[in-house]
Image (cartoon, grey):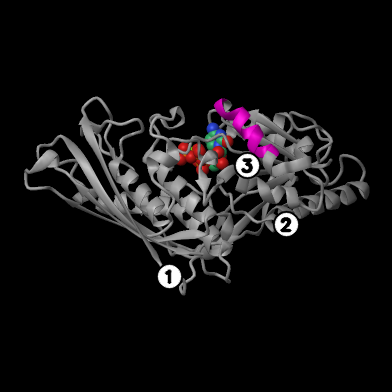
Amino acid sequence: MDRAVVVVAAGSGTRLGIGTAKAFVPVAGQLMLARALAPLFTLASPTLVVVVAPSALLEDCRQVVASVAGAAVAYTAVVPGGTDRHGSVQAGLAVLPDSVTSVLVHDAARCLTPAAQFARVFDAVAGALDAGALDAGSLDAGAGAGAGAGAGAGVDVDVGGVVGFVPALPVTDTIKRVSGDVVVETVDRAALVGVQTPQGFPLDALRRAYALSAQSETDDAGVFQAAGGTVRFVPGDADAFKITTPWDLGRAESIVRSRSGSGAGGAADPAAPVRFGLGVDVHAFDAESPCRVGLLDFPGEPGLSGHSDGDAVAHAVCDALLSAGGLGDIGGTFGTSDPAYAGAAGDVFVRGAVGLLADAGLVPVSVTVQVIGNRPRIGARRAEMQDALSAAVGAPVAVSGTTTDGLGFTGRGEGLAAIATAVIRPV
Ligand code: CTP
Ligand code: MG
C-alpha cells in the first residue's frame, strides 16, 4: 500500500470542556472519532490508517477503529500520542511502513470532512510525485533546482523543492490587524485563506521535515515549509471545520441531524405533532465538591452532592427530554449508582438522552429550564449557560432563574432545584 492517513486524536479537548478526550465525545449519537474515520474506509485506493490516541484510551480507540473499519481493520494501527499535536503526528509517522509514498495528516476534530476532500489531497500529492519523477527522469541526477527531490533523498537534508498540499477556503470576514484593542489596518483578504486538514505530503519528505523541526507548529504545512518545502492549496470544504468549542459541537450536531432527516434538509417533521416533557431535579449543597451547574463551572461556590457531578440543571433537562419521548427517567436509564457514571458531567446525560431520542426517531425542538435557589447566581452567565446546554441538546435551551423568597429548602440555602420542559418532534 502506498497511501496512508495519520488521524491525530490524542488531544484532551480542553476548550470543549467536557472532561472527555475530544475524539471520544459523541456527535449526534456517534463518537467524533468514528465519524472522522468513516470516510477513510470508502476511498477508492487502498489506504493504511493510523490513529493516534490518548495513551489511556488505546483499547477504546481500537474498538472504535474495528467497528468502523470492518474487514479493513487489518490495514489500521493505533498508537499513543504525544504531549502536543506535533508529537502526536510524529508518533503516527513513525509506524508507517516505507512502502508508503503519500501520507495525509488529519485532525479527528474535523470529523465531518467528506471523503472527496481526502481524495482531492491524495490526488494532488500523487500528481506532484509523478511530475517530480518525470522531471527527474529527464535530467541527470543532481542537476536541476530541486526537481524530483521528493523521493529517496537523504534523511538529514531539508525538503527544498518538494511540494505538499493543504485544503483551504477563502476568508469571508473582513480581517483587521490589531494591536491591543486598537484596529491598525484592514488586511487584504484576497491574499488569505483558511487552512484545513487533511494535509498531504510525500512520506519521506514529511518525516524529514518533522525530524528537522525545531519548534512546534500548529499544522503540518508549517513544519514542512519551515524545512524548505513548498505548500500549495486545493479547494477545502465548509464541512471540514474543526470542532473546538461547544458551539462548534452544536453546529456539527445540527448539520448531522439536518441531513439524517427523512426529507431533504429537515431534521424535525413540522407536520408531526409535538410532544412535551417535564423534568425536576434537586441536589443538596456539598461544600467539598466543585460547583457545576448548567454545564458551567462556578469556582468558589459550594458544589452539589450526588453520585455524578450533581448538576441539577443538566439532570432536569435530561429528564425532560426522556419524559417527552416516553423513555423513562435518568435514574432508570443511566443508573444512579452505576460506577460508569460516578462523577460524570451533566453533559453526558443530556447527550445520552438526545441519542436515545434519535434512536427512537425523535429530535428536540426546544427546552426551557428554571434554576431555583439562592446561589450560584446565574444571571451574569445565563447566555453562556444557554449556549452550553443548547450545544448539548442540539436545539435552543432557554435558562431562567429564581429564588424562593427565603422559603423552603432552597430559601434556606440547603440545596438547588431545577425544573425543565422539553418539546420534541418525530423526525
Ligand atoms: N491532538 C493530538 N495530540 C495532542 C494534541 C492534539 O493528537 N497532544 C489532535 C487533536 O486530537 C485534534 C487535533 O490534534 O484532532 C487538533 O487539535 P485541537 O483541536 O487543539 O484538539 P485538542 O488539543 O484536543 O483541544 P484543546 O486544544 O481545546 O485541548
Ligand atoms: Mg489543542
x and y, in percent, of residue 43 in the image = 76, 52
**Quarter assignment of residue 324:** bottom left
Specify whether residue 168 is painted magenta. no
- Graded by Cα atoms within 10 Å as few (under 14), some (14 to 19) or many (20 or more), the crowding at tag 2 reads some
Q: Secondary structure at mark 1?
A: loop
Against 15, residue 44 (above or below) is: below
Tell whether label 2 touches label 1 (CB within 8 Å).
no
**Quarter assignment of residue 49:** top right
Q: Identify residue type, mark 2.
A: Arg
Q: Nearer the viewer, residue 250 or 307?
A: 307
Specify whether residue 61 is painted magenta. yes
Q: Nearer the viewer, residue 235 or 333?
A: 333
**Which residue is under mark 2?**
120
**Which residue is under mark 3?**
220
Q: Which stretch did the figure color magenta?
A: 56-66
**Which residue is under mark 1?**
273
Q: Secondary structure at mark 2?
A: helix
Q: Nearer the viewer, mark 1 or mark 2?
A: 1
Real-space CA distance between mark 1 and mark 3, rounded to the nearest whole angstrom? 50 Å
* Residue occupying the far bottom of the picture: 271
